[in-house]
Image: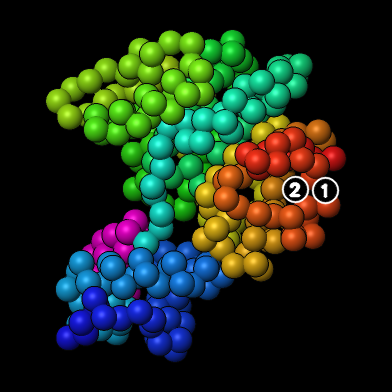
Amino acid sequence: MINWSKVTKLDETEMQSLFVAVKDARGIDFIDYAQSSLQRRIIRFSEMEKLENVNELIHKIRFGNGFADRFINEVTVNVTEMFRDPSFWIVLRDTVLPELNKRSIINIWHAGCSIGEEVFSMAILLKESGMLSKTRIIATDLNNEALKLAQSGISMLKNQILNAKNYQNFGGKASLSDYYKVMENKVFYDKELIRKVEFKKHDLTADGYFGVFDLIICRNVFIYFNFNLQEKVLGLFNQSLSKNSFLGIGSKESITWCKGARFLTNVSVEDKVFRRI
């Protein structure tokens, strides 16, 4: 059995076979993901599952009942928080939403929505701005389990300390606890916030255009893609943005080197908010 704690890099041939197995089993292609971070998550998963080697991992992905879904759930990143980077949400509130409010209907795409913390953040922001009723949100992710959790509106009570701090730093009009009820160690967000949200599976690496949007939010996703995939996804976003609409990415991400960046102008350099020109 491999001592996974001492493994720092997987064999390239094994990785290619693993990618083929995942694509065959669930249609997800990891080949253009940033390999170093992806390999770390695969190694951690293999150690957690006490697998003998990569061949056993491949075999279980192909033939194990529910194993492929568990693998995808573990190696795709689902770490998030509400109102993460409060200054980003301030830019949305003070600069982006006043522009969008001039439109009769607002369409927003949360791409790579994970477990839904940012979807609920957006819904709260829209509600406090008086714009929720005329907004339609589509929230997508490739991880079915994350989508189910996002749609349920359930979060852990322990997470609310950080979430409430972010909300306070953003300058929310109420208390974050006004938007949820507590039962034991969990919180249940008001379902009315996501009444007009459509949660759907969408793989940015493989699936294409499905609509035109006034705002696309895809934060802390580009960092897990290689340059080729970043270019491809930015092309999809440009195709999906109407004229003078907005794109928000993670504060530590950069798309300035992409050819598609020529269609965008900066709204906030620090918070990585752009406008389609």
- Mark toward the start of the polypeptide (1 vs 2): 2
Q: Do the residues labelled 1 and 2 touch (CB within 8 Å)?
A: yes
Q: Residue at x 69, y 48 (%)?
A: 237
* Image mark for residue 1: none
Q: Residue at x 59, y 25 (%)?
A: 90
Q: Is residue 70 magenta?
A: yes
The amino acid marked with disc number 1 is Phe
Q: Which one is closest to the eye, mark 1 or mark 2?
A: 1
Q: In this view, does 117 lie to the left or right of 45?
A: right
- Say few, some or many: other residues with alpha carbon within 10 Å of mark 1 (under 14 / 14 to 19 / 20 or more): few
Read off the residue under disc 2.
238
Q: Residue at x 63, y 39 (%)?
A: 271
Q: Quadrant of residue 48?
A: bottom left
Q: Main secondary structure of the magenta part?
A: helix
Read off the residue under disc 1.
263
Q: Residue at x 52, y 49 (%)?
A: 220
In this rendering, the answer to whether 30 lies above or below 258 is below
In this rendering, the answer to whether 137 lies above or below 233 is above
| The magenta segment | 60-74
Q: How is the image coloured?
A: rainbow
Number of residue marks:
2
Q: CA separation, marks 1 and 2? A: 7 Å
| Res 213 visible | no
Across and down, in percent, residue 38 comes to: 43, 68
- Say few, some or many: other residues with alpha carbon within 10 Å of mark 2 (under 14 / 14 to 19 / 20 or more): many
Query: Tag 1's secondary structure?
Result: helix
Q: Which quarter of the rendered picture does the C terminus lie within?
A: top right
Across and down, in percent, residue 2 comes to: 21, 85
Across and down, in percent, residue 27 comes to: 47, 65
Q: Quadrant of residue 162?
A: top left
Q: Does the magenta stretch include residue 158?
A: no
